[in-house]
């Protein structure tokens, strides 16, 4: 293949295999791509498609036990990498300035004072204004957005020519995401960097990148100019991924398209009408305040302040806001996991006490953000669900196996997964088990706390379809928490916006999205509506 004079990275026929005594598998097959000087190249695909493995192979960071064939030519250029999860990538026993300068200190022999100066300079470059203070911080003292900026500073410390970004905006809210994307674009322009940006978020890829490759099952199915791929995808899978993205204009009367439905040529099914005989309970929050206990029984200032909300029986209220706004704290208060500092939680006219009685605890159930953390890795799906049925004495022992099968069918999991353990399930399958756990107790109120935030776009669409179908079929009352306004609008009847522990706006979902009154809501919407190539609205480069 002819190599362009401006090519800074050339990958040809990359193949990655896992070999073990038990089995072998090909994880990445014949991947070829070129990165040009000064461009941002996107790699998009679902979990397990081989995106991160390809990136780690380029950086030379593959774990032992993997065999690599093919060629990776960096043309003498240096590489820096920004990892997906800052708390995993940052050593909790080192201060920020030491983390940033660890590698260059060893290479250049810098003194401690010189390293400190360089760290503060890099922190300012990545948009952290109080660099002197933050340089002395520990990773756990920083917000998610600040930790991600520290990771970018670490990657820049070695003066790279190529920056490899592995899902750097996956776990942050839309405002922080917008800031990180603007930062990467600014750094790329100021330093003349070339960037490979890996993500499962198609909207981010479309907004940021010049060219894109679509991966599935370790193979690149399609690559090309971002506008060509997003406006006129040649591969059926690429088209299916693009169509499964929820937007602020998605048709709420139908299910979201999924990869399976698009590739099969099926139109999205109409959603069933809400049941008129549902089990949902009306929920009222009256002046709710929640704080956290510190040592010596001292409490923090109220994280949630004077929240008053009503969720009508059988409807869904979406609660949106940036990270730290108090959304999850409200959810934990409603679920009885936190003691309110003041105010009242009323369900169907009954004021909830803390701690909850078993019957009251059964009334409200929660689907958590991280399904892996919510499942016991030592228990199978069958054991997990049967334990709940036994503890709450809901089903006689002889009928528990049949009830487990019913629950799996409700969340659209084949019955064979009853014998599976958490490690054997994908992210979407784990979240379906999390929903089945919540439904096992026959709740009247279901809380979904960022339950699709970390899922691939097509898996997210499928899980959202399942949640909406179950809510309508069972007539559940649902509190849906998210920082994604497009997702929240699709699911919700009404939307409430939180800012710094308070509700600042509330109303019918379409009214809040189409005609917001508060400036903060407008900012959330502006951050959610990234300029897109398919709409001809990408920013000038």
Image: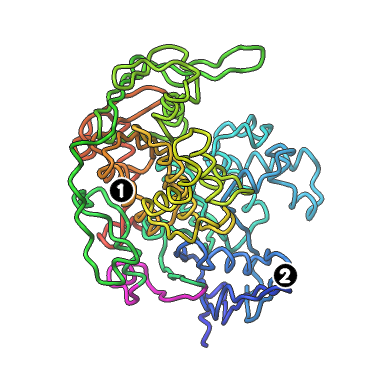
Q: Could you tell me residue 503's position as x and y percent?
A: 33, 24
Q: Which residues are magenta?
A: 218-236
Q: Position of residue 42 (x, y in %)?
A: 46, 64
Crowd rating for badge 1 (residues with CA inside 10 Å; few <14, some 14–19, many 20+): some
Residue occupied by mark 1? 529
Please name which of the two marks, 2 or 1, marks the residue nearer to the observer: 2
| Label pair 2/1, CB-CB below 8 angstroms | no
Q: Which residue is mark 2?
A: 65
Q: How many marks?
A: 2
Decide if residue 210 is on the left or right side of residue 349.
Answer: right
How crowded is the residue under tag 2: few (<14 C-alpha within 10 Å), some, or many (20+)? few
Residue at left offset 19%, top offset 55%: 270
Residue at coordinates 47% horizontally, 75% vertically from top-left? Answer: 220
Q: Is residue 415 above or below residue 138?
A: below
Q: Position of residue 475 (x, y in %)?
A: 26, 38
CA distance for labels 2 and 1:
42 Å
Q: Work out which quarter of the rendered image holds the C terminus and state it.
A: bottom left
* Left or right position of 478 against 510: right
Helix, strand or loop at mark 1: loop
Q: Name which residue lies at 34% across and 57% down.
A: 540
Of residues 179 and 313, which is closer to you in this image?
313
Q: Is residue 22 left or right of residue 46?
A: right
């Amino acid at each position: 293949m002819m190599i362009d004079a401006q090519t800074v990275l050339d990958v040809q026929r990359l193949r990655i295999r896992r070999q073990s005594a038990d089995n072998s598998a090909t994880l990445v097959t014949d991947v070829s791509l070129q990165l040009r000087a000064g461009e941002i190249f996107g790699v998009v695909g679902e979990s397990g498609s081989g995106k991160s493995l390809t990136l780690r192979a380029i950086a030379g960071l593959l774990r032992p036990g993997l065999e690599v064939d093919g060629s990776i030519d960096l043309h003498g250029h240096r590489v820096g990498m920004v990892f997906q999860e800052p708390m995993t990538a940052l050593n909790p026993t080192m201060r920020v300035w030491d983390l940033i300068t660890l590698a260059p200190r060893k290479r250049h022999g810098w003194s401690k004072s010189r390293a400190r100066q360089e760290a503060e300079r890099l922190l300012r470059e990545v948009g952290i204004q109080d660099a002197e203070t933050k340089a002395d911080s520990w990773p756990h003292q920083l917000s998610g957005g600040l930790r991600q900026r520290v990771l970018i500073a670490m990657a820049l410390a070695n003066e790279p020519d190529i920056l490899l970004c592995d899902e750097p905006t996956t776990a942050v809210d839309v405002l922080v995401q917008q800031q990180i994307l603007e930062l990467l674009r600014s750094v790329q322009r100021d330093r003349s960097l070339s960037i490979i940006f890996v993500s499962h978020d198609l909207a981010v890829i479309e907004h940021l990148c010049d060219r894109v490759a679509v991966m599935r099952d370790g193979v690149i199915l399609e690559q090309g100019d971002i506008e060509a791929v997003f406006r006129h995808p040649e591969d059926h899978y690429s088209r299916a991924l693009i169509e499964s993205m929820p937007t602020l204009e998605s048709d709420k009367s139908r299910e979201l398209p999924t990869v399976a439905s698009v590739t099969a040529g099926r139109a999205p099914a109409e959603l069933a009408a809400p049941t008129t005989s549902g089990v949902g309970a009306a929920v009222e929050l009256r002046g709710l305040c929640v704080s956290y206990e510190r040592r010596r029984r001292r409490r923090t200032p109220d994280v949630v302040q004077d929240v008053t909300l009503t969720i009508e029986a059988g409807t869904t209220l979406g609660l949106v806001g940036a990270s730290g706004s108090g959304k999850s704290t409200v959810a934990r208060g409603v679920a009885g996991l936190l003691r309110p500092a003041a105010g009242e939680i009323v369900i169907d006219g009954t004021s909830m006490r803390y701690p909850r009685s078993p019957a009251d605890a059964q009334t409200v159930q929660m689907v958590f953000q991280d399904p892996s953390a919510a499942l016991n890795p030592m228990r199978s799906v069958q054991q997990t669900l049967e334990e709940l049925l036994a503890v709450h004495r809901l089903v006689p022992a002889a009928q528990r196996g049949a009830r487990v099968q019913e629950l799996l069918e409700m969340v659209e999991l084949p019955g064979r997964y009853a014998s599976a353990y958490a490690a054997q399930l994908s992210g979407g399958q784990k979240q379906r088990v999390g929903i089945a756990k919540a439904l096992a107790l026959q709740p009247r109120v279901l809380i979904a706390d960022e339950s699709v935030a970390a899922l691939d776009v097509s898996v997210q669409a499928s899980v959202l379809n399942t949640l909406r179908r179950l809510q309508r079929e069972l007539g559940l009352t649902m509190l849906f928490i998210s920082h994604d306004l497009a997702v929240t609008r699709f699911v919700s009847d009404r939307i409430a916006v939180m800012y710094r522990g308070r509700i600042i706006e509330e109303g019918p979902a379409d009214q809040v999205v189409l005609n917001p009154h508060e400036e903060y809501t407008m900012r959330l919407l502006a951050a959610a509506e990234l300029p897109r190539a398919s709409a001809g609205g990408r920013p000038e480069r």
